Structure formats: C-alpha cells, structure tokens
Amino acid sequence: MTSGLKTPSSYYIELITFFPPRPITNEAELIATQNRINHILDKGNLTQDERDYLKVLAVLVYDYEQQHEIIPPLKGIELFEALLEESNLEPKDLISICGSESKVLDILSGKSQLTENEIQALADFFKISPTYFNDLIIK
C-alpha cells in the first residue's frame, strides 16, 4: 500500500463495496449516486468514514454536473430570489439596502424597481456584477 495513506476501516470497505464510487456517465448513474448520498445523509450522526465516502460521491456528482448540466443564466427577479434563497436571507434582511421590507417584496413581485444606488449596493452585498440587476432598474 502507498505510504502516507491510512488503511481504510472495514466499514469504509463495506461502504465502497456496497456502492463502488465510479465516474458517472449517464442520468441513471447520477440518480443512483444521489439516492445513495441521500440514504446516508438521512441516517444523521455520520461517522468519519461516511463523511469521507460522501465527499468522494459528491465529487463524482459535481464532475458529472459540470460536464452535462446546463445552468441557465439568471437575471433580474429570478436572480434576486435565488440569491436570497442561497444566502438564507429574507426580505427584511435587505432593509438597509432597499429602505423597507415592503420595497423588497414589491421588487420581488415586479411592482417596484431598484435605483442605481440600490443595484450597486446589492451587487456589493452579493459580490456580483451590477449588470445582473439591470432589468430591475428605474430608468
């Protein structure tokens, strides 16, 4: 065995024997791998062996998705909603930028638009280019 690598435990060997990690080549394999990941995660209180195994499976899923999944570019309201969700934020969390929670809700519902200053502040806050918010701007 290569020096520097620790000998895997019998449980880790059991994990990789039951569902051997292999490069994912199609949707069926992707779904099977995601199901295996979910099955392990559903157990809760993961062992180090399970965490290590999940990292391997996650890399395989990531590699497949990078090669095969086309992620449509989001702009405007869709982007704004996605950024809030991904950041676990609620409209009230942006009061300092938009002035009020109701203004944020109005922007999300298409009833209001952003000022150039608000767009710049949101872009700085989310660390993205302000151009992604251009269709939400007051002209």
Image: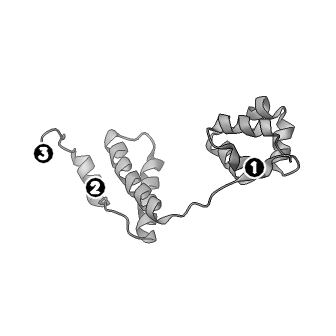
Report the side of 1 relative to 131 (left or right). left
Residue 117, horizontal then vertical, whole percent: 78, 35
In this rendered view, identify the residue nearer to me: 69 or 30: 69
The quarter holding residue 87 reads top right
SS for tag 2? helix
Three-letter amino acid code at the position of disc 1: Asn
The reply to whether callout 1 and callout 2 are in contact (CB within 8 Å) is no
Binning the other alpha carbons within 10 Å of mark 1 as few (below 14), some (14 to 19) or many (20 upward) gives: some
Query: Looking at the image, is mark 1 or mark 3 earlier in the sequence?
Result: 3
Tag of residue 16? 2
Residue 99, horizontal then vertical, whole percent: 84, 31
Query: Looking at the image, is mark 1 or mark 2 earlier in the sequence?
Result: 2
SS for tag 3? loop
| 60 versus 112 height, above or below | below
Q: Outermost residue, front direction?
A: 139
How far apart are the two marked residues, 2 and 3, measured between alpha carbons? 19 Å
SS for tag 1? helix
Three-letter amino acid code at the position of disc 2: Ile
